């Protein structure tokens, strides 16, 4: 069992956990993830390691309560325990001094973009961050992103905070201003990552995205996380999760992620119904 040290809601349905996992905290690198099981017979949920404290022996994950398992996890509080936390998994982010690097996080994708942005800054890059959300209330890790940025921008779809528009519009403005950009990292919803790739492709800017396919075992054995990159099949759990954005088949990724939508909705509805029956809704 893995003890939860702290559990804080950052926004509606989005919760930050600090969990005791000493070995993972010592070994993890930017871009890697863990697979969590809330209960011993539960679903395996892949979650990016947002941060770690090797001295305390803790890792930080940020969870959006979308399906049954993540909603179940978000009901946990400090002092509670999680059955399994396995990791670190995946290939770490490729970090070097590119020059000017732009790190873009959309929604909960900001939690994944943050550790890589921090590593890029530590490698000597001039780091620009673009932190996007639908509304002001859903902006995540603003202070943390600013702390590792030379320039930091917030965008909201509704204009309630920061720049009124999408992260791609702010990125295009930076390119149009003549600023030389050497590297872009984009993490968020599939349509957003595809849109970023479309913006950078004409300019030949190296662009990396972190993919979020259906994942089961996290070791490459099940084949559930197949993605198509440069017309080749890759496994996101061991070959990624980060890939060249200009080579990713985003349509294939989106189609595969919709396979179990019906079953996921049924499981989520049943969980919420059970919670209401027990007065936990």
Image: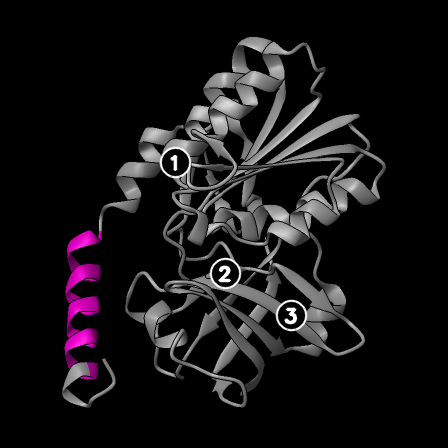
Residue 249, x across and y down, in percent: 40, 28
* Label 3 Cα crowd, 10 Å radius (few <14 / some 14-19 / many 20+): many
Start-end of magenta stretch: 260-275
Secondary structure mostly seen in the magenta stretch: helix
Q: Which mark is residue 59?
A: 3
SS assignment at label 2? strand
202 vs 141, nearest the viewer:
141
* Total marks placed: 3
Left or right of residue 29: residue 40: left
Position of residue 268 in the picture relative to residue 138 (left or right): left
Which residue in the rendered view is the most extreme toward the front? 160
Q: Position of residue 17 (x, y in %)?
A: 54, 72
In the displayed image of the protein, which residue is found farthest to the right? 124
Q: Residue at x 48, y 22 (%)?
A: 169
The quarter holding residue 240 reads top right
Q: Position of residue 199 (x, y in %)?
A: 50, 17
Residue shown at 19% from the left, 68% from the top? 267
What residue is disc 2 on?
47
Q: Is residue 44 left or right of residue 61?
A: left
Does residue 238 sit above or below 154 in this rendering? below
- What numbered label is drawn on residue 157? 1
């Amino acid at each position: 069992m893995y003890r939860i040290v702290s559990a804080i809601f950052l926004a509606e349905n989005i919760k930050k956990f600090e969990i005791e996992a000493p070995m993972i905290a010592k070994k993890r690198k930017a871009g890697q993830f863990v697979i969590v099981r809330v209960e011993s017979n539960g679903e395996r949920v892949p979650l990016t390691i947002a941060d770690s404290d090797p001295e305390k022996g803790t890792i930080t994950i940020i969870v959006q309560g979308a399906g049954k398992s993540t909603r179940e996890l978000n009901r946990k509080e400090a002092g509670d325990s999680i059955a399994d936390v396995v990791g670190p998994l995946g290939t770490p982010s490729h970090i070097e001094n590119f020059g000017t690097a732009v790190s873009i996080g959309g929604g909960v994708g900001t939690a994944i973009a943050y550790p890589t942005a921090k590593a890029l800054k530590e490698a000597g890059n001039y780091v620009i961050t673009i932190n996007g959300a639908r509304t002001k209330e859903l902006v995540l890790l603003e202070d943390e992103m600013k702390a590792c940025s030379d320039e930091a921008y917030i965008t909201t779809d509704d204009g309630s905070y920061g720049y009124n528009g999408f992260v791609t519009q702010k990125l295009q403005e930076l390119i149009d201003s003549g600023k030389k950009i050497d590297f872009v990292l984009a993490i968020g919803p599939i349509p957003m990552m595809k849109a970023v790739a479309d913006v950078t492709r004409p300019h030949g800017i190296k662009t990396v995205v972190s993919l979020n396919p259906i994942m089961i075992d996290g070791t490459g054995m099940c084949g559930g996380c197949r993605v198509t990159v440069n017309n080749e099949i890759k496994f996101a759990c061991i070959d990624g999760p980060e890939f060249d954005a200009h080579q990713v088949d985003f349509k294939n990724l989106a189609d595969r992620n919709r396979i179990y939508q019906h079953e996921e909705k049924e499981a989520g509805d049943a969980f919420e119904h059970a919670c209401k029956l027990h007065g936990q809704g």
